[in-house]
Image (cartoon, rainbow, N blue to C red):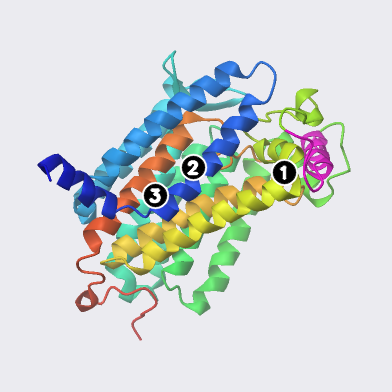
Amino acid sequence: MTRLGRAISIWARGIDWILFFSIIPIVFFGLITIYSFIDSDQLFSKQLMWFIASLVAFVVFSSIDFKFLRQTKAIVWLYGLSAVLLVILFLLGEIIKGSKSWFDFGAFSFQPVDLAKLVLVLTLAKYFSRRHIEIRNIRHILVSGVYALIFFVLVALQPDFGSAIIIFLIWFGMVMVSGISKRHLLLVFLVCALVFAGLWGLAFKDYQKDRIITFLNPLHDIRGAGYNAYQSMIAVGSGEVLGKGLGYGTQSRLKFLPEYQTDFVFAAFAEEWGFVGVLILFVCYGTLISRILSVAKRGATNFETLYALGLSILIMSHFIVHVGMNVGLLPVTGLNMPFMSYGGTNLFILFIGVGILMSMRRYSRATYRDLSSNEIVGIQAE
């Protein structure tokens, strides 16, 4: 066997192919949902190109040894870069649909918040992996909260409330899996309540308040704030068992359902594919998350374990919030469906995130878990 052949063989053995091939159908469902609608050829072509670029990124990042990410210096540089990009947005960002969230480069656009979410996962994984045995000290919960708060504020001011919520959920989820003391849990919820009260009085715009009120009573303003959620519920329900068929989703084709390719791609998909299609989609996501958690169990150190858990929290948060707002259980926040919604930046960053996970999986298999470091999830100092 040639040197190249051996290298490819080693790389292939390090990939969790069940995980990888659970993602491909999700991307495929997104592409055909976009392709099935009128005037969507350009969107389909761009998303297909991003998908190809994402596959290349996956191969590259899964081939790199990311042990250097255990070093504080590397994480500090990544965190600083992400924060700087979010600040520069206020000066050079493009305003799209009322939010200054994009850098427009002509041929393509870039949304820095997607990078910030992945960097936050890495940052918190690094922080908690070094201080896990001291996690009962509330100081570490507060310090980790500052890391998340900086990103949260910069994103909320764009304003991109949906992504800000995801940043909060990443922090909250990783605090929970890191072994938080039960007596501090109530304090965390209290802080969350105070933050929400402050945002309601000082930061939320009227349309954002309307969306939350609509969440409590979706039908109170179906011609105004509740219109999108109401049309989405109709689209999901009208799909019934087998769906209306590819290209026959009337809610989307007749423009009753806005943003079918991004914010409401699940509703558009459910209308055409019905309960059976949704069930297949959920099985794919379930397989993806279960395989990520399987990798988490085999992490060589707590850093790899916490990164895998954080990546699963990132994907699950997007999935739950997106589906929830599409079926009327959560307020409309403008979040995409991971790997499925139109949007190159999100797809590209997610594939990079999975590529990093596969790299950690390959280079961690020899050591399995470093028990001598006392960095074991679930062990707390008494």
Callout 2: SS: helix
Q: Are marks 3 and 2 in contact (CB under 8 Å)?
A: no
Q: Is residue 191 above or below residue 109?
A: below
Which residue is nearer to you in this view: 246 or 95? 246
Q: Distance from label 3 to label 2 (Cα)?
A: 25 Å
Callout 3: SS: helix
Which mark sits nearer the N-terminus, 1 or 3?
3
Picture coordinates of residue 44, whole percent (x, y): 56, 23
| Count of numbered labels shown in the rendering | 3
Amino acid type, mark 1: Asn
Quadrant housing residue 130:
bottom left
**Disc number placed over residue 120 in the picture, else none:** 3
Amino acid type, mark 2: Ile
Viewer-nearest of discs 1 and 3: 1
Quadrant housing residue 41:
top right
Q: Which residue is mark 1?
A: 326
Callout 1: SS: helix
Indicate whether residue 236 is drawn in magenta: yes
Name which residue lies at 43% across and 42% down.
350
Viewer-nearest of discs 1 and 2: 2
Q: Residues within 10 Å of mark 2 (few under 14, many from 20)?
A: some
Q: Which residue is mark 2?
A: 24
Q: Distance from label 1 to label 2 (Cα)?
A: 22 Å
Residue extending furthest toward the top:
106
**Disc number placed over residue 2 in the picture, else none:** none
Q: Which residues are magenta?
A: 225-245
Name which residue lies at 21% across and 74% down.
373
Q: Are marks 1 and 2 in contact (CB under 8 Å)?
A: no
Q: Distance from label 1 to label 3 (Cα)?
A: 27 Å
Which mark sits nearer the N-terminus, 3 or 2?
2
